[in-house]
Image (spheres, rainbow, N blue to C red):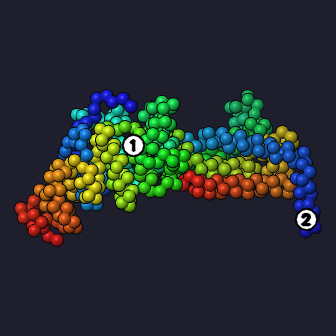
């Protein structure tokens, strides 16, 4: 118990004293996860909206597959990206394995389906409400995509934040494709796993506290935004 | 907005529509000329709103045709000359002004002109001071006026209105009617459904009476309100409840010939 409380105290000290190692890891984590979530949003938002608005054969199958992809096991994604980026893999020539780029690629694959599937639900609800009015105004299904994405922006921010939450908390995929190399590919989750195995609970706890704070902060932001949207915009 | 060849008259021929195997619109035929204000009357479920949606191209009929100036293709050039205001206004999640600007953008109005034009129309419906308010926090009556302003801004040749004053109080209803009147005076042909007989008298030049998916009577408004020919229309005007059936399809005895 004493060790536990000591670890906590040491963790807070690391945070308070702006420990360079700790903040390097946090900065890289944010860089990887924010890049991944940005790319995943660029892919997932229009794909989710298009799944609602554009008519095509096999739409139901695609929706079921997309929903299934929400539960993709990170280690499997990590393994596939590893195989693709490894020297003997099809994209091995790019030399991306064990770089932050490889970690971003793995996280994009993990969270783009989540953002697309959640976007589809938001846009479907909005389309039910807007369909007749938009068609009446002369906006076809394809040209309604940007309109619906903009009008669903408050709900969609929550969707993107959910993706960011998943990306920042994920460990399996980034461990495999990043390799957890100190000062190169070490992020919060992989560092926690390593430090725990080494027995350095202070650094692990410090990172854990930051990761948790980030999660709480994201949820608070989503709540405040939703509340603001309801009160201010009637959304 | 430039006005090329008119899309009117609107001619509807043998229009039928089914949903889940039930015929909701049955061989409806009529022609509406430019400059008229047609009030579509009838009980709930008569097919009034459905008829508007079929004419406006929001639904595709199972049989029959809708001709706009002799053309049944319903091209985008026909669509952009029409507007529709729904019973429940659908407001985009942006400001009142931006809602109108959005409609103008879809009509390819140059960006530089949109804001001024949108603001002018907002002022005309008495919402100038609410231009920057989010549209969805406006009252129901204000939202309906905004919906009318949005339709008015695009200067449609034909404006469909689906019970635009349902569940509005008298002052809000008056305001909406004034706006409809102004739009019609600007040359827009009005096709509107309503349950309010007083409103139909005040606004209409023509009346169509529908019952269970059929168009039973079409008349000039003054003639219709002076005394419709159809017995069901007579009963409707008297305020009788129209859930009864005739003993025979077209009895000679007016309302006395029906089973209540």
Q: CA distance from mark 2 to mark 1?
A: 67 Å
Residue holding disc 2: A5
Give the x, y percent position of residue A229. 59, 53
A152 or B110: nearer the viewer = B110
Give the x, y percent position of residue B78. 32, 35
Quadrant of the frame with the N terminus of chain B: top left
Disc 2 secondary structure class: helix
Q: Residue furthest bottom?
A: B260
Give the x, y percent position of residue A230. 58, 56
Q: Residue furthest left?
A: B252
- The residue that appears at 28% across and 34% down in the rendered structure is B7
Looking at the image, is A73 positioned above or below residue B259? above
Q: Name the subunit of mark 2.
A: A
Residue B246 seen: yes
- The residue that appears at 69% across and 42% down in the rendered structure is A36
Q: Is residue A171 left or right of residue A149?
A: right
- The residue that appears at 9% across and 67% down in the rendered structure is B257
Q: Quadrant of residue B32?
A: top left
Q: Which mark is residue B151?
A: 1
């Amino acid at each position: 118990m004493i060790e536990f409380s000591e670890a906590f105290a040491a963790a807070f000290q690391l945070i308070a004293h702006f420990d360079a190692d700790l903040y390097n890891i946090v900065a890289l984590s944010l860089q990887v996860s924010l890049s991944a979530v940005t790319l995943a949003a660029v892919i997932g938002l229009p794909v989710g909206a298009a799944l609602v608005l554009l008519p095509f054969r096999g739409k139901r199958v695609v929706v079921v597959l997309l929903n299934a992809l929400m539960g993709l096991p990170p280690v499997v994604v990590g393994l596939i990206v590893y195989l693709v980026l490894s020297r003997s893999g099809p994209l091995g020539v790019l030399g991306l394995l064990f770089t932050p780029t490889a970690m971003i690629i793995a996280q994009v694959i993990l969270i783009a389906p989540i953002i697309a599937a959640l976007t589809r639900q938001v846009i479907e609800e909005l389309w039910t409400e807007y369909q007749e009015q938009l068609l009446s105004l002369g906006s076809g299904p394809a040209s309604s995509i940007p309109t619906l994405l903009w009008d669903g922006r408050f709900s969609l921010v929550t969707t993107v934040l959910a993706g960011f939450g998943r990306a920042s908390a994920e460990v399996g995929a980034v461990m495999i494709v990043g390799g957890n190399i100190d000062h190169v590919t070490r992020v919060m989750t992989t560092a926690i796993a390593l430090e725990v195995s080494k027995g350095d609970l202070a650094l692990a706890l410090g990172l854990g506290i930051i990761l948790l704070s980030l999660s709480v902060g994201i949820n608070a932001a989503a709540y405040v935004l939703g509340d603001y949207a309801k009160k201010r915009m009637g959304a | 907005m430039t006005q090329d060849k008119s899309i009117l008259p609107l001619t509807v021929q043998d229009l039928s529509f089914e949903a889940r195997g039930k015929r909701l619109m049955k061989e409806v035929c009529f022609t509406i000329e430019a400059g008229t204000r047609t009030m579509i009357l009838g009980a709930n479920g008569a097919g009034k709103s459905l008829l508007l949606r079929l004419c406006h191209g929001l639904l595709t009929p199972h049989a029959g045709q809708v001709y706009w100036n002799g053309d049944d293709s319903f091209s985008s050039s026909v669509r952009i000359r029409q507007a529709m205001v729904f019973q429940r206004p659908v407001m985009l999640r942006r400001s009142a002004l931006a809602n109108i600007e959005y409609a103008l953008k879809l009509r390819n109005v140059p960006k530089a002109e949109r804001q001024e034009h949108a603001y002018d129309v907002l002022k005309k419906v008495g919402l100038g001071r609410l231009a920057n308010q989010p549209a969805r926090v406006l009252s129901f009556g204000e939202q309906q006026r905004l919906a009318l302003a949005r339709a008015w801004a695009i200067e449609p040749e034909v404006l469909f209105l689906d019970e635009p004053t349902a569940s509005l109080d008298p002052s809000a209803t008056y305001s909406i009617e004034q706006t409809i009147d102004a739009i019609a005076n600007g040359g827009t042909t009005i096709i509107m459904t309503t349950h309010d007989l007083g409103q139909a008298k005040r606004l209409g030049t023509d009346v169509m009476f529908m019952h269970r998916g059929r168009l039973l009577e079409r008349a000039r408004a003054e003639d219709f309100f002076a005394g419709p020919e159809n017995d069901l229309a007579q009963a409707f005007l008297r305020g009788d409840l129209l859930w009864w059936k005739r003993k025979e399809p077209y009895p000679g005895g007016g309302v006395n010939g029906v089973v209540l």
